[in-house]
Amino acid sequence: MFEKMNLDDFVKQVASNEPVPGGGSVSALAGSLAAALSNMVASLTIGKKKYLEVEEDMKKVKEEAIILQEDLISDITRDSEAFNRVMKAFKMPKNSDEEKAERKEAIQNGSKHASEVPLNVAEKSLKIMDLAKIVVEKGNKNAITDGAVSAMLARTAGLGALYNVKINLSSIKDEEYVSKMNEKVTEIENALIQKEKEILDIVEL
Amino acid sequence: MFEKMNLDDFVKQVASNEPVPGGGSVSALAGSLAAALSNMVASLTIGKKKYLEVEEDMKKVKEEAIILQEDLISDITRDSEAFNRVMKAFKMPKNSDEEKAERKEAIQNGSKHASEVPLNVAEKSLKIMDLAKIVVEKGNKNAITDGAVSAMLARTAGLGALYNVKINLSSIKDEEYVSKMNEKVTEIENALIQKEKEILDIVEL
């Protein structure tokens, strides 16, 4: 759905007073662009005599990047849908005990789903960091800064998605679930920041 | 041109083995999305009783964000065109002294232009930081993380653009020009990093 919108219309839709697409969807788009940039550096390296030695590495990067890039572009819509599901649950009637219980369950399930979608975006963003590192270290030197932009976008995508995980966790009563998710959040958060730093240190201009 | 491409096609175009659109154009898109997210938070604040006190601030944010958002979406194409101009200059014939001189001048002028376009993107990204700070401090609390994503995208947009400034400066012989540009680069770079940090410290979830 959103992936078929043109850039100009999408930006305007983000800017509107509708809560979706918001930071979650934009983070997914940032992730897709991050994957595409690492993919591009690999593409600009493959077939170049000077880089024959790393040709296999680059082909592998390309293969993984394409999957992430396509998956993340679908996450733009997936994230907005997950948000809408939670909003819909909050608007359910609560006149009887039965209705209240149904509404509560819908909110809980919806919130779990809405925290899992961005967690998944964050996990993919972390995978992109590994691709960005390979292209920055071994790829076409003329495109090294594209690898740096890939890493910075992956950080934004990942950390942006994790904010959305945390917001949704705040409505979830299942403490064990929340604590497990929080552990993952912290782990991915630290890894994203650390890996981006490592990559940017290599690119130093 | 690029702004009328759909998200899916644009991402694929980035990923291709064409050097444009690359990190420079993607940085401009990141900037446009950053402006749009601050715009959205302002839009979700305006008209809300609870936020009547900050209504004027939000209207001002919205006004400035729209301009930046639209300007940056045009920069996607502008950056790719500037890159193409430099590439074209490098391919100019150099058989005679006259041709050599012409080529040299075209490279110098093209490189100056190609460093000024992203410098301008970086300056706009820095302006977005100020908008993101206002919406995170005073805007609708339900959308505070959208303000955080805005700031992170503005950092990526700005630093990504500055990489492109630096690359182009490396071909320029006019030392005074390079030194003045480098000063600006360092100044904006530091400000972007500092301001993003300040904003994320406010959002702490």
Image (tube, coloured by chain):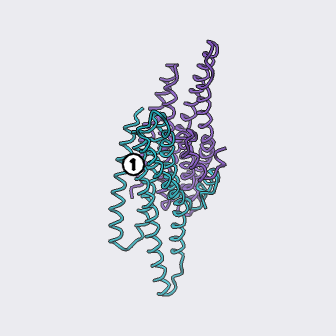
Chain colours: A purple, B cyan
Answer with left or right where residue A161 lies relative to residue B183. right
Residue B131 in percent (x, y) is at 42, 47
Residue B67 vs residue A193, the one in the foreground: B67
Corner quadrant of residue B57: top left
Viewer can see residue A80: yes
Residue A115 vs residue B126, the one in the foreground: B126
Residue B69 in percent (x, y) is at 51, 53
The amino acid on which the numbered mark 1 sits, given as a three-letter code, is Asp
Residue corresponding to mark 1: B130
Q: Helix, strand, or loop for circle 1?
A: helix
Total labels drawn: 1
Q: Residue at x 53, y 49 (%)?
A: A34
Answer with left or right where residue B108 lies relative to residue A36. left
Residue B126 in percent (x, y) is at 40, 53
Answer with left or right where residue B92 lies relative to residue B60. right
Residue that extends furthest to the top in the rendered view of this protein: A97
